[in-house]
């Protein structure tokens, strides 16, 4: 059986930046209140000419260019999103059309904040099964479209963007020394707590039970993340980077500490980008790689969590 590997990354964010001071002019909040509670300073907000599929296609095009591949080289497109307004065509189909692809399989995956790690595992499984050879995996969300801009407890969290990864078959990655190119996924959910994070209504609006999510994330997720490392054959102290879903700095920092990744670079893109849901992990990783903060080949823990309450994680080798 072949393995798979992430060979390139790309990301896209809208040009418009919304600061904490900007939000303070809209709702009863302040820079100090937001920073002390969630650690966010700015977030990017897309305009009407930047729908989910446009942001996804921009990120995907950058990842393909970095990989040295063309649109016709891709045979599977997966887009993780929970903010697609239309049911059909899917965001994956629209991305394929925007990029001028041939006849790839196209699929959207809606697992909200853990969508990208679910999609990455799905691409890995498809490649291992021989159903695909080269996949474009994208996380893209336009959270501004579903924000309640009158609710100071949620609107301060959200941002827009997209991140993409090119995943290719690699026979050498299946049993590579020190772990495979994309390690085994560990995924699951807590169905009875699914209502803790919601995107409901017409028009749809984001809402959450913040304290319930915080307690679950900081107490239940660290041992699960350590099991992800065990499945990959990697000790937490040997990780080169940890990229958690960028939900809240007060969740990211204690969870990373409890994992025991004492030598790892910890992604903190939430400070500049806010919570971008399925886009947060690939976007944060793409930025770390772009800045040269993680060495090529280093083991990186990716761990998504959030809506449903779902989680999915794997260790990959940094491209």
Image: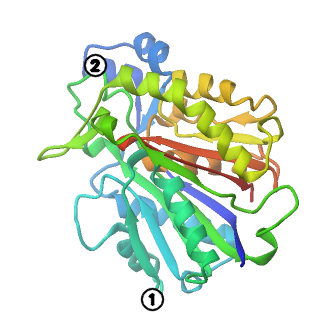
Q: At 55% from the left edge and 83% from the top edge, which residue is drawn?
A: 131
Residue 78 appears at what percent x and percent y? 46, 68
Outermost residue on the front side: it is 192
Judge left or right: residue 239 versus residue 247. Answer: right
- Between circles 1 and 2, the one closer to the viewer is 1
Q: At 34% from the left edge and 56% from the top edge, which residue is drawn?
A: 50
The one of 128 and 71 positioned closer to us in this rendering: 128
Judged from the image, the secondary structure of the residue bearing numbered disc 2 is loop
Residue that numbered label 1 is attached to: 103
Q: In the picture, residue 9 is in which quadrant? A: bottom right
Outermost residue on the right side: it is 177
Q: At 53% from the left edge and 21% from the top edge, which residue is drawn?
A: 250
Q: Quadrant of the C terminus?
A: bottom right
Outermost residue on the left side: it is 202
Sequence-wise, the earlier of marks 1 and 2 is 2
Density class for disc 2 (Cα within 10 Å; few <14, some 14-19, many ≥20) is few
Is residue 83 in view from this perspective? yes
Q: For residue 25, which numbered disc appears in the image?
A: 2
Give the CA distance from mark 1 to mark 2: 48 Å
Residue 318 in the image: above or below residue 269 = below
Is residue 59 in view from this perspective? no
């Amino acid at each position: 059986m072949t393995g798979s590997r992430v060979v390139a990354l790309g990301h896209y964010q809208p040009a418009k930046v919304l600061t904490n001071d900007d939000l303070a002019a809209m709702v009863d909040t302040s820079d100090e209140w937001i920073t002390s509670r969630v650690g966010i300073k700015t977030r990017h907000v897309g305009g009407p000419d930047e729908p989910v599929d446009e942001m996804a296609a921009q990120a995907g095009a950058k990842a393909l260019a970095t990989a040295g591949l063309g649109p016709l080289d891709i045979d599977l497109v997966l887009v993780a999103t929970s903010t697609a307004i239309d049911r059909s065509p899917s965001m994956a189909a629209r991305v394929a059309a925007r990029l001028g692809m041939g006849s790839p399989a196209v699929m959207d995956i809606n697992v909200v904040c853990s969508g990208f790690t679910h999609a990455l595992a799905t691409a890995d499984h498809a490649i291992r099964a021989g159903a695909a050879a080269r996949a474009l995996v994208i996380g893209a969300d336009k959270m501004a479209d579903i924000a309640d801009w009158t609710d100071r407890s949620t609107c301060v969290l959200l941002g827009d963007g997209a991140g993409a990864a090119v995943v290719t078959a690699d026979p050498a990655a299946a049993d590579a020394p020190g772990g495979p190119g994309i390690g085994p996924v560990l995924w699951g959910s807590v169905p009875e707590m699914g209502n803790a994070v919601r995107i409901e209504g017409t028009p749809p609006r984001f809402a959450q039970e913040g304290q319930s999510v915080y307690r679950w994330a900081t107490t239940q997720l660290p041992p699960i993340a350590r099991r992800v490392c065990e499945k990959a054959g990697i000790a937490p102290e040997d990780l080169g980077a940890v990229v958690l879903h960028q939900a809240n700095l007060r969740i990211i920092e204690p969870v990373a500490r409890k994992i025991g990744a004492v030598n790892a670079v910890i992604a903190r893109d939430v400070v500049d980008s806010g919570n971008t849901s399925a886009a947060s992990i690939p976007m944060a990783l793409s930025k770390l790689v772009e800045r040269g903060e993680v060495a090529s080949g280093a083991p990186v823990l990716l761990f998504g969590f959030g809506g449903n309450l779902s989680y999915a994680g794997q260790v990959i080798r940094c491209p």
